[in-house]
Image (cartoon, helix red, strand yellow):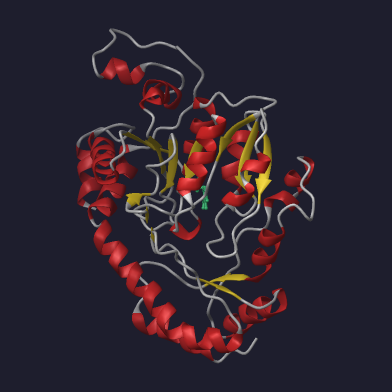
């Protein structure tokens, strides 16, 4: 709260004030990323990535079917055609073994999504992208402070995006960030984010007036939200530790029940340090998943499913999505259930959830 009061006292509550600069520097130092720019959302950071890559009509972009619409919409808004890739059975991340077969001379970008903050197989993805000269944009909406082979998620692609939406580990209600690992994109990113003007250079005293130099939009986060966000970032190890305890408690208490009931718990590969964003169950069938939702609801517990396969949505079908394209995505989407998971979830409430689940027989 004191940060927000300070932002107001500073009389600078529009973008790129004191707290935005603090957040930028904090994230750059902490993650080891050359440039971070706060945005109004992860959706907008993805849109900026599509603009920076000059994605245009006729281009193709490889995206998971098992993701949030924004991962795909950002490119579709530029006229590109999404090519949907299926996911792995273990992490539910895009299946890198299917990647190379989907690349064509029109492929402009690949967007791995680190589902639940567990890293995609980045070595293989980057090697394939390099071989075909295709950009990689990590959608790291779930994975802030998660790691793959000791390196922070979001530091692998030329560009990466974060979400600070209320549902994320670190939040300011609505917000996001563009992480720029390829320095060639930095200058233009500043312009696109400031309505296509060189306003950022003007404020740094590098030009004597600012003017319209490129296309762009209004992607800058208010400093009041940045003040809220900075308070969260300062406490990230504490927030992450709380979430880790919640995740580990679910895992410990549900392992025996899951084995008996043929339910699968999340799999974290040894090379990944997850961000503790989510805990999910994979029930044996769609019917069992629906029955557990109803069973928990009767006990006052809300548990929810997650993404519906995008290749089978109305829009996905318009782009040629067919039922057999991503069979693993279809299967797991039907069976996945997310358990209540938020930083302030206290032990007794969580125990009530665990005890209810342990009584359920699929
Ligand atoms: C994988 C993924 N990408 C992007 C987004 C969009 O984030 P935002 O709400 O910050 O635009 C979400 C939202 O939950 C998401 O899950």
Q: Position of residue 211 (x, y in %)?
A: 40, 10
Q: Nearer the viewer, residue 213 or 274?
A: 274
Q: Residue 170: percent from the left, percent from the top?
A: 35, 55
Image mark count:
0
Q: Position of residue 106 (x, y in %)?
A: 66, 28
Say whether residue 91 is visible.
yes
Residue 351 vs 10, above or below: the answer is below
Single out the residue that lies furthest toward the top.
208
Q: Locate residue 359 relative to residue 290 in the image: left or right.
A: left
In the rendered image, is residue 135 in sight? no
Tell me what residue is drawn at x 73 percent, y 45 percent: 316
Query: 1 or 235: which is nearer to us?
Result: 235
Q: Residue at x 28, y 39 (%)?
A: 28
Q: Position of residue 121 (x, y in %)?
A: 48, 52
Q: Looking at this rendering, what residue extends furthest in the bottom direction?
A: 359
Q: Nearer the viewer, residue 192 or 183?
A: 183
Q: Which image quadrant for residue 21?
A: top left
Q: Quadrant of the C terminus?
A: bottom right
Indicate the quadrant where residue 329 lies: bottom right
Image side of residue 244 versus residue 278, left or right: left
Say if 233 sits above or below 261 in the image: above
Q: Which residue corresponds to the image point at 31% horizontal and 42% vertical from the top-left?
A: 226
Residue at 44% across, 40% down: 160
């Amino acid at each position: 709260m004191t940060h927000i009061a300070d932002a107001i006292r500073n009389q600078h509550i529009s973008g790129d004030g004191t707290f935005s600069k603090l957040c930028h520097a904090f994230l750059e130092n902490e993650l080891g990323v050359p440039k971070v720019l706060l945005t109004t959302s992860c959706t907008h950071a993805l849109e900026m990535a599509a603009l920076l890559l000059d994605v245009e009509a006729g281009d193709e972009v490889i995206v998971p079917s098992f993701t949030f619409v924004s991962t795909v919409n950002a490119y579709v808004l530029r006229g590109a055609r999404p090519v949907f890739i299926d996911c792995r059975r273990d992490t539910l991340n895009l299946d890198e073994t299917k990647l190379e077969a989907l690349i064509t001379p029109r492929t402009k970008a690949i967007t791995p999504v680190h589902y639940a903050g567990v890293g995609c197989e980045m070595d293989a993805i980057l090697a394939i992208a390099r071989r075909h000269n295709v950009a990689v944009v990590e959608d790291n909406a779930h994975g802030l402070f998660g790691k793959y082979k000791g390196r922070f998620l979001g530091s692998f692609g030329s560009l990466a995006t974060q979400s600070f939406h209320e549902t994320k580990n670190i939040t300011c209600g609505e917000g996001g960030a563009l992480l720029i690992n390829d320095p060639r994109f930095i200058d233009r990113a500043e312009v696109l984010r400031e309505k296509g003007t060189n306003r950022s250079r003007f404020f740094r005293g590098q030009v004597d007036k600012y003017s319209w130099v490129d296309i762009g939009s209004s992607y800058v986060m208010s400093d009041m939200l940045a003040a809220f966000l900075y308070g969260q970032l300062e406490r990230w190890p504490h927030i992450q530790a709380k979430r880790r305890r919640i995740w580990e408690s679910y895992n410990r208490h549900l392992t025996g029940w899951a084995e008996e009931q043929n339910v699968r718990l999340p799999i974290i590969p040894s090379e990944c340090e997850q961000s503790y964003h989510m805990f999910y169950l994979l029930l044996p069938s769609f019917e069992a998943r629906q029955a557990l939702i109803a069973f928990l609801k009767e006990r006052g517990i809300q548990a929810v499913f997650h993404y519906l396969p995008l290749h089978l949505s109305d829009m996905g079908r318009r782009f040629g999505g067919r039922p057999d394209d991503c069979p693993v995505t279809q299967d797991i989407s039907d069976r996945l259930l997310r358990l209540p998971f938020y930083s302030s979830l206290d032990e007794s409430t969580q125990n009530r959830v665990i005890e209810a689940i342990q009584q359920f027989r699929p």
